[in-house]
Image (cartoon, grey):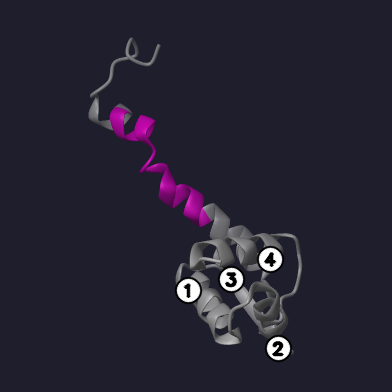
Amino acid sequence: MKKCERMLLLFTLFMDGIQVRTASLAAKLGVTPRSIQRDIEHMRSFGVPINRVDCKYSLDREALHEWRRSKTRGFAGFMPENRFAESGEMSSEAHR
């Protein structure tokens, strides 16, 4: 399983409220526990609020809400319709 696939799986598990133990998930995926730890650290580097309690990782639900709101605002400027609207490159006729 590729790193991006593992990270998507981790994020899905976290969003479903599942607590993850690196050793058990690593065994199921056929990778080392260190690979799972690196994946989690990579997610944290993007600001995903992940807690570790008693060797289990999970999302910090309160911080997640704020993180999602801030990322949504941050991504809005990259949406094509916003970029074109600001630059005036596309007229309303082109949208039809």
Q: Compare marks 2 and 3 and give the one earlier in the sequence.
A: 3
| Magenta segment boundaries in residue numbering | 70-84
Q: Nearer the viewer, mark 1 or mark 3?
A: 1
Q: Nearer the viewer, mark 2 or mark 3?
A: 2
User: Is 79 in front, or is 26?
Assistant: 26
Q: Residue at x 63, y 67 (%)?
A: 10
Disc 2: which residue = 55
Return the mark for residue 49. 3
Amino acid under disc 3: Pro
Choose top left, top right, bottom left or bottom right for residue 56: bottom right
Amino acid under disc 2: Cys
User: SS class of the residue under badge 4?
Assistant: helix
Q: Is residue 83 magenta?
A: yes
Q: Compare marks 1 and 3 and give the one earlier in the sequence.
A: 1
Return the mark for residue 42. 1
Q: Residues within 10 Å of mark 3 (few under 14, many from 20)?
A: some
User: SS class of the residue under badge 3?
Assistant: loop
Q: Compare marks 1 and 2 and give the one earlier in the sequence.
A: 1
Instruction: Estimate the spatial distance between the alpha carbons at disc 1 and disc 4, rounded to whole Å.
Output: 15 Å
User: Is 71 in front, or is 40?
Assistant: 40
Q: Residue at x 51, y 80 (%)?
A: 38
Disc 4: which residue = 14
Amino acid under disc 1: His
Q: Nearer the viewer, mark 4 or mark 3?
A: 4
Q: Residue at x 56, y 82 (%)?
A: 37
Q: Is residue 15 magenta?
A: no
Choose top left, top right, bottom left or bottom right for residue 96: top left
Q: What predominant SS class does the magenta segment belong to? A: helix
Q: Compare marks 1 and 4 and give the one earlier in the sequence.
A: 4
